[in-house]
Image (cartoon, grey):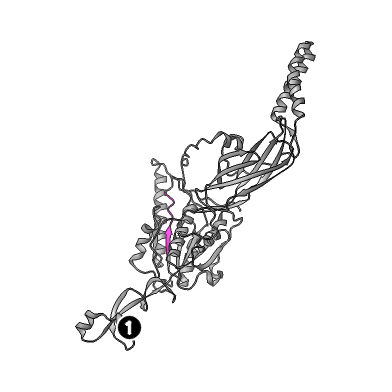
Amino acid sequence: MSGRQDGGQDRRPERRSVRAGAGGAGPVAPPAPLLPPEVRRALGGEGVHQPNSEPPNPRPEGPRPSERALRLATVAAAATAAAVLTGQPWLLALAVGPACLLVLAGLGGRPDRASATAEVASRRYFEGETVTAVVTVRFDGTVGWIDPGVAPGPGTELVSVDVSGPAVKLGFTAARWGRWSLGVVDLDLYDAGGLMRSTVRVDLGDIEVFPVPADGTLTPIPVRLPDRLGEHTARQSGEGIEVIGVRPHVWGERQRRIHWPSTTRRGSIQINQFAAERTADAVVLLDAFSDVADPVTGASSLDESLRVAAGLVRTYLRSHDRVGIVSVGGKLHWLQPGTGDAYFYRIVQTVLDVRRDLTFHTPDLSRLPPPALPHGALVYAVTPLADNRIMDVLGGLAERGNPIAVVEIPVGDPRISEEDAVERLALRLWRLDREAVRFSLVEKGIPVVPWLGETLDLSLAPLLRSRLSGRVS
């Protein structure tokens, strides 16, 4: 599903990376897969991806000698110098061959007024999808061959390079969610003899990589629902399909609603009473204060948080509910609740910039525009509970009276040495501190459910035992 332009059916000061591992070495990374030869050559150096490196400096403008020309000139110069120093004229014969190749190759055509343009099939992708970019070179004269050099952006990986005439087709894999630069390409244009080359640089632009949403079908709802038609059963009676009781007949009501068993028993006409069907308002609060790396798996809590948030958004939108987003940490991003399939992409785009925030701002929810958090809206806080500032945010929401549910992203236990009694004690204290945080939230009437990493239904099922209601502290 590439290029989501129309909405289908159904990614500073330095960001603090809170490492949970207190001791010991980090997880051993699996060996990188062997890349094709043309990809290793295009990446240059050791032929490996360096996602944190900056694009290389632009190469010199205009024609310049190639590696082949330098090798031939070196052989000719060395042979001539040896002949002069030793006084052996026959050594000049070793310089004749390279010199003739230099002269004959220089008579061939060379490219002039070269330029390049890049076309990317789409600017929106999901994680794991293939990004295809085609770079077309235009020039005057003759080109012997084209040698591309690629510097991929930090969120993408180069997987294929195909040079066909003046067109270079590049294949990337969208590795991580976010708004990334696709990278730059330096095209070396060699003349017919391969002795001179000129370089053209082209920028591939930016792409948006959406997270793969977590699967889920359950949609817990608060006690109080707004007075709008929807698919959730409310406690109030009204027009719906779920029978909640019977009542005496009132003149003018439809006969098809008569409940005949009750009418027969009571001796008077009884009418089925139905529950009203309403829609729900849900707001997903994304904790972007910190990015915690699991010390065992190396998984990023921010990556998991956005996948869970995207899954919640998609699940409620499928039920025709109104869903909004608020991301705290770095700059404050928010989007008021809305509905519709295309709204999913608007919501995800709102939080893609959390990786590119240049500064941290402590959010002040008392100044948040009222449309961002409608009164009575159910708030899902997706957080690893690793930063104390999120506790202040949740406390402020509880004081507002909004029903809140916390989806905790697990961060894993710190790595310790089993032989060290002090480290074992520190681990025990760390676990007790986590339990204290959860207990304080439950005391405020905020249920905490863990993200189990499989489907949202397993995490949200405990919330279905009772309807969620806000509590004023």
Where 460 falls versus 245 (above or below)?
above
Looking at the image, which residue is at 23% across and 81% down? Answer: 262
Left or right, residue 413 beside residue 160? left
Looking at the image, which residue is at 55% across and 58% down? Answer: 5
Three-letter code for the amino acid on which mark 1 is drawn? Arg
**Place of residue 205 in the rendered image (x, y in percent of width and height, measured from the top left):** 63, 50
Where 75 falls versus 403 (above or below)?
above
Number of numbered callouts drawn:
1
Disc 1 is placed on an element classified as loop
Left or right, residue 147 beside residue 337? right
Where 20 falls versus 270 (above or below)?
above
Q: Is residue 407 magenta?
A: yes
* Residue 55 in view (yes/no): no
Left or right, residue 71 beside residue 254? right
Question: As drawn, which residue projects farthest toward the bottom?
Answer: 251
In front of the other: 41 or 102: 102
**Place of residue 110 in the rendered image (x, y in percent of width and height, measured from the top left):** 74, 35
In front of the other: 68 or 471: 68
Q: Provide the residue span drawn in magenta.
A: 405-412
In front of the other: 257 or 156: 257
Where 376 falls versus 390 (above or below)?
below
**Place of residue 328 in the rendered image (x, y in percent of width and height, measured from the top left):** 53, 61
**Residue labelled with disc 1:** 254
**Place of residue 194 in the rendered image (x, y in percent of width and height, measured from the top left):** 70, 30
